[in-house]
Image (cartoon, helix red, strand yellow):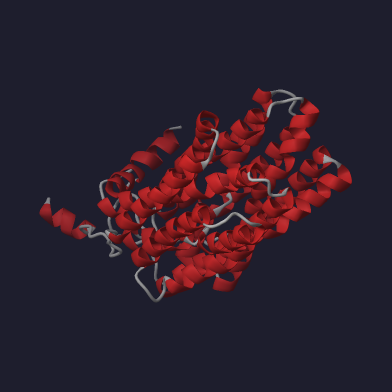
Amino acid sequence: MRGFARFCYSSHMVAPTQSAPQLSIAQVLLCGGAIVTLSMGIRHGFGMWLQPITLERGWPRETFAFAVALQNLAWGIAGPFVGALADRFGTFKVLLGSALMYAAGLTLMAFATSGLAFASSAGILIGLALAGCTYAVIYGVIGRNVPAERRSWAMGVTAAAGSFGQFLVVPVASGLIGAFGWQNALLMLGLAVLMVMPLAFGLREPARDTVVHGTHQSVFEAAREAFGYRSFQWLMTGYFVCGFQTVFIAVHLPSYLRDHNLTPQVATTALALIGLFNVIGTYAAGSLGQRFPKRRILSTIYILRSVTIVAFLAAPLTPWSVYAFAAIMGLLWLSTVPTTNAVIAQMFGLRHFSMLGGFVFLGHQIGSFLGAWLGGRLYDATGSYDVVWWIAAALGVLAAVVNVAVRETAIQRPTVAAAAAAA
């Protein structure tokens, strides 16, 4: 504990040099993309277990839904702390621990016989694991090893890998459940997620060089600086909206379609289309971030989401209108991820990048929790999802407006020499 306290409060932490990458770009993208594909793909397939688990255990659906909502919240809360550990001790160690935790969570999920045990495994344990083997931590390695002029593109490639995981692993999970049963399928995926550990060796960075002429910024000083910076607040607001919209749609779109007498196959096809077009959208957003102001890309994404939602509600509801909606939303689905994280690196540098990315992602996960919960709450109160659809559309407009005000330039800090001279 004394060591952790020194880490948190030290005013003599120095920044790593950013002059020369330590790992090849191809190695970082291959290993990082594979880790995100596996970890995000398994997570996106959780809906496949809802019916078999609740039917066999005799649980209401709320038990399963609460565990997934708790997972999102635990993921978001743990993000800044796990990111800080990755910034301080390296991504490699964090990935090893997270892989073991993920495998344990899936295994305990298979044998949980009470709602509390299920919430602890599928909710808290897997949520903590996801904080350590998804975007914020992997993006820290990318930031340190990819030149700034290619960073947004590289983050887009990794986000596209996570999107491909959604498209790939969901049908695999469905096939495993059908062939081996839901418990054995969870155990198989628990073994599969251990593949993160050998992949983590490809992201093991050499000892970082340090400089003595940069700012000596502790964890708490970096967090205080970020939260006091208006552009960081705008990014968190936009990410909150992103989480609200995407999780509301992912969780409640199938029920919305069933309420309007469309078959389950339509919902399955729609979710697959979102995953497929998400690959294109995230890659395109990362590439465009190298050529155009990222704040304008973010504003465009959010306003297009709102327009798409309004058009979906106004058009006659048919399978083809659902597929068109899914394809367009897929292009916009996680395209905010590489762009937002590239702005954070651009504004604050790389020393505390994973931690600050974790804080922004916490905003996303709070929105995710509210999108999942409020969708069900307002449906129970009104008998319709219409109110939540319009809230999602209005929030998109809000996110588009606040992102226009984001300043992408690096924050100005006094150097150590200047601070000493002033003292």
Please give the count of numbered marks on the rendered protein.
Answer: 0
In the image, residue 112 lies at what x, y percent?
A: 74, 28
Quadrant of the image occupied by residue 167 = bottom right
Q: Is residue 353 above or below residue 65?
A: below
Q: Nearer the viewer, residue 320 or 268?
A: 320
* Residue at figure coordinates x 53%, y 69% from the top left: 283
Q: Is residue 162 visible?
A: no
Given residues 341 and 236, the one toward you in this image is: 236
Residue at the image position 72 percent from the left and 48 percent from the top? 264
Residue situated furthest right in the rendering: 179
Task: From this view, report whether residue 253 is shown above or below residue 214.
Answer: above
- 411 sits left or right of 185 in the view: left
Q: Is residue 415 left or right of residue 366?
A: left
| Residue 340 image offset from top left, x and y in percent | 41, 59
Residue at 44% across, 37% down = 3
Report the side of 299 relative to 92 (left or right). left
